[in-house]
Image (cartoon, rainbow, N blue to C red):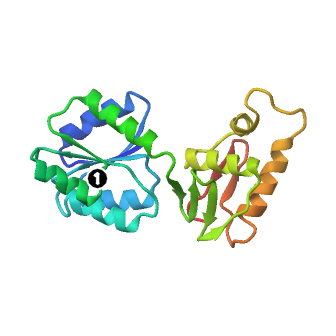
Amino acid sequence: MNILVVEDNQLLARNLADAFGGRGHAVDFAANGEHGLALALEHPYDVLVLDLALPGIDGLEVCRHLRARLPRRLPVLMLTARDTLQDKLGGFAAGADDYLVKPFAMEELLARCQALALRHRDYALAVGSLQIDRRAQAVTRAGQPLRLQPAGYQLLLALAEAHPRVMTRSELTQVLWHDDPPDSDALRSHLYQLRQALDKPFALPMLVTVHGVGFRLDAGA
């Protein structure tokens, strides 16, 4: 998972970093609401772990801004020491998906994050101006619908899910043919067709070749 943690308690933040990182998850941190909101709007995280009591704008305001401004659904797990029913209802009304009261067991937090990420995998995935609706298998770039062949859609989805990491030719071959790749270089043809649909109508290419390594998506294109 690619996780954003917005938490001003440095000790708790370090503990979360150890817990998530120890299980192979990538984690970004923000210590205040403004920074957390900016990161959440800029990067395609799988889950947001959001403290309620933050300097600057609090967790409720961060959540409200996200729901109003982010085109895709980012799952939000809210952390707080407030445990009344009204506090929880306020968190859900602001757009939180789950609510965990401090102190909590780290294993429970990890399990809840994993469940949220899996539950929301059908929602749209965003990389810059690119939007992918996994449920409908529909793709737009800068609001313009793209017509992709099935292989092109699979490649683009894999690249978007891996973003910003570079995917090797071997990994992309695995996406299409698993352990039974064709003898010919069919991947080259599918990548060409994907470029025609994804990049040709636009000024800047989004599918970037990293020579000697593989391919990645450029969110700034």
Number of marks in the image? 1
Nearest the viewer among 128 and 134 is 134
Q: Is residue 183 left or right of residue 190?
A: right
> Extreme right residue here?
184
Nearest the viewer among 59 and 72 is 72
Q: Is residue 32 visible?
A: no
Residue 55 in the image: state x and y as whole percent: 16, 58
Residue 98 in the image: state x and y as whole percent: 28, 45
**Residue indicated by mark 1:** 96
Q: Is residue 135 left or right of residue 29?
A: right
Q: Is residue 21 left or right of residue 199?
A: left
Q: Under tag 1, what secondary structure?
A: loop
| Quadrant assignment, res 128 | bottom right
Residue 91 in the image: state x and y as whole percent: 21, 54
Q: Amino acid at mark 1?
A: Ala
Look at 35% across and 63% down and name the residue there: 67
